[in-house]
Image (cartoon, helix red, strand yellow):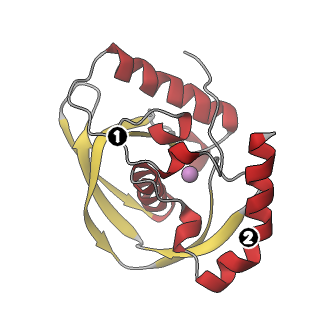
Amino acid sequence: MAILPIRTYGDPVLRKQANEVTDIDEIIVKLAADMIATVRHAGGIGLAATQVGALSSVFIIDPTPLGIEEKPLVVINPRIVETAGEALREEGCLSIPGLSEELVRPATVVVEGIDLDGDGVALEGTEVLARAFLHEIDHLNGVLFIDHLKPGRREVLRRRLREIARKRSE
Ligand code: CO
């Protein structure tokens, strides 16, 4: 397993749409394993393939920082099938280091996709897990959490975002 460099704000790959995975080959299996190693190394909860520059529709969640003793989740070709409620919670992103903002998102979400064996999975998430699912699926569509902020708030953060983008290109 390798720890991959995480692409940060300003990198055009973060704005790209991930492609549907049609074949779970060794490249995808290795990508998922590397993404798990990478998110653990970075101390995060979730990571989407676009964040490591791979335009494949894959995200992983490592629930151990949430106190959930479960294996990491690998979801391929995820789609949101249901959302319910609303929750306000602070949210951050490994691709936007040092910035976190409160954001309203659905409180519960059901996601369908396939796992590494090619079997269909349906996952229900609440609270932090719901947010993580929505956040990672956004990434696979080229969307960042800051896109959901009110325009006034984004304006306030503009300078800090520019600074993150500047550091990236150094
Ligand atoms: Co993120």
Disc 1: CA contacts within 10 A as few (<14), some (14-19) or many (>=20): many
Seen in the picture, residue 23 relative to 153 is either above or below; the reply is: above
How far across and down, in percent of the image, does residue 1 sit? 54, 15
Q: In the rendered structure, which amino acid carries the disc numbered 2? A: Arg
Q: Which mark is residue 158?
A: 2
How far across and down, in percent of the image, does residue 38 sit? 60, 30
Q: Residue at x 26, y 23 (%)?
A: 24
> Decide: marks 1, 2 in contact (CB < 8 A)?
no
Q: Residue at x 40, y 73 (%)?
A: 106
Seen in the picture, residue 130 relative to 139 is either above or below; the reply is: below
Of residues 126 and 117, the one drawn nearer to the viewer in this rendering: 117
Of residues 128 and 53, the one drawn nearer to the viewer in this rendering: 53
Q: Earlier in the sequence, mark 1 or mark 2?
A: 1
Report the residue marked by disc 1.
57
Of residues 166 and 128, the one drawn nearer to the viewer in this rendering: 166
Number of marks in the rendered image: 2
Quadrant hosting residue 58: top left
Quadrant hosting residue 4: top right
C-alpha gap between disc 1 and disc 2:
29 Å
Disc 2: CA contacts within 10 A as few (<14), some (14-19) or many (>=20): few
Quadrant hosting residue 109: bottom left
Q: Quadrant of the C terminus?
A: top right
Q: Can residue 67 be seen in the rendering of this structure?
A: no
Q: Which mark is residue 116?
A: none
Q: In the rendered structure, which amino acid carries the disc numbered 1? A: Ser
